[in-house]
Amino acid sequence: MNDHAFLSSAQILTSCFIGQKCQFYKKSIGVTLDDILRDEIQPNIAFTDQTILVKINAATTMIMFIGGLINSILSLITFQSKDLRQVGCGIYLLASSITSFLTISMFTVKFWFVVLTQMNLSIRISVVRGGCVSIEPLLKLCLYLDAWLNACVAIERATLVFRGVNFNKKRSQHIARWIIIILPFCVMGSIVYEPAHRELHEVNTETNKVNIDRWCVTRYSPSVQQYNTIILFFHLVAPCIVNLCSALFIIFGSAQQRSTAQTRRTLREHIYDQFSEHKQLLISPIILLILSLPRVIMSMLSECVNPSNHRLLFIFGYFISFTPSMLIFIVFVLPSALYRKAFQESFRRWRRLIHQ
């Protein structure tokens, strides 16, 4: 029993500390891509000789990048239409087309930065330190912006149902433009503390080893760690909840309005009709919430977790959490007859310009 307890304690210590003398505490909260891939990447070995898992992850990353690029191009073709940008929804989705590409681009940069800096230890320490401090916060900024812009679309649609014929398109445009300007500063302000708490350390991870590993370490005080937990939960979960609540409001609000105008049918029948008509408004946020859950869980891990014990699970959870940034066109354009028509018209116009 005592031996078992000793082994458990030793495993926790090796997960919590790095360096042959355990001189650095490596974990505070969350599991990053650095943590997941670090032990899998072999230093000073060519990419072609890396493990099959690293190669599969690299291929998956590039497929996601290409998918994100196609998604953004198709979305930009759709929402460059002035008719769609007469209300806030079109403006938000145009901005989301850009931020979704920035998100998937930063994800790709993050992956290759981790791989290349672990493969090639001769890369200048200043470059590695700069990436350690800046890439993860920038990735979070893009990811959170993308989520909140989608939430703004949901709020705008709910407002349209609530206001009905009194909905002011000009005011909607004005508010949307201001939100797009202000939102990045709000998100940046909420995570501005993070670069200051990210450090790069060079340590010997094993005794009698000449090779030195580089660790990008995030260390928070208890108060900052608590704040970080709240911020992570807020930015990852709140937009999904806003989407879901807005969808329910649209369905029940529309049903109530039709029930008042068409008294021959019951409210329950109208609600059923609205669920059938707007089911994609419910399905989309539920899918986005499910896809965000792995990142929420990984971000909330406050114990010293060793990702190498369940590496495939962590990799799957990390990668899948970025798929919403590839789905703007599928989630918003394809289910909407108005957006599909605008896309087809814009696509034909661009094709004519190319063939001229």
Image (spheres, rainbow, N blue to C red):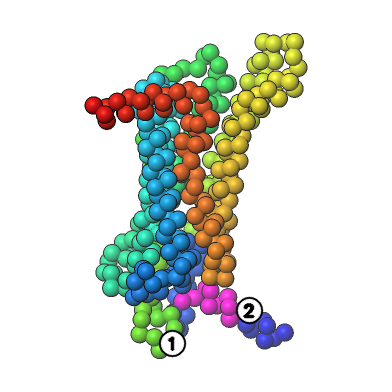
Q: Would residue 109 be found to the left or right of residue 161 on screen?
A: left
Q: Does residue 23 show up magenta in the picture?
A: no
Residue at image position (51%, 27%) is: 336
Circle nearer the N terminus (2, 1) = 2
Q: Quadrant of the C terminus?
A: top left
- Structural distance between the alpha carbons of marks 2 and 1: 21 Å
Looking at the rendered structure, the secondary structure element under dot 2 is helix
Disc 2 residue type (three-letter): Ser
**Amino acid type for the residue under numbered disc 1:** Thr
Q: Is 270 on the left or on the right of 157, as rendered?
A: right
The residue positioned 61% from the left and 79% from the top of the image is 9
Quarter occupied by residue 200: bottom left
Q: Residue furthest front?
A: 355
Q: Give 167 or 345, whichever is nearer the viewer.
A: 345
Residue 247 appears in the picture as rendered: yes
Q: Residues within 10 Å of mark 2 (few under 14, many from 20)?
A: few
Q: Quadrant of the N terminus?
A: bottom right
Query: On the image, numbered disc 1 is attached to which residue?
Result: 207
Query: What range is drawn magenta here?
Result: 9-18
Q: Give the camera-side residue of 24 and 258.
A: 258
Choose top left, top right, bottom left or bottom right for residue 83. top left
Identity of the residue drawn at 58% across and 32% down: 281
Q: Is residue 138 above or below residue 27?
A: above
The residue beneath circle 2 is 8
Relative side of 74 to 236, left or right:
left
Occupied quadrant, residue 276:
top right
Q: Main secondary structure of the magenta part?
A: helix
Q: Position of residue 51 (x, y in %)?
A: 45, 70
Please state the horizontal and vertical placement of residue 110, each as a whole percent of the image: 39, 57
Question: 80 above or below 25?
Answer: above
Query: Residue placed farthest to the bottom in the image?
Result: 208
Q: Is residue 241 visible?
A: no
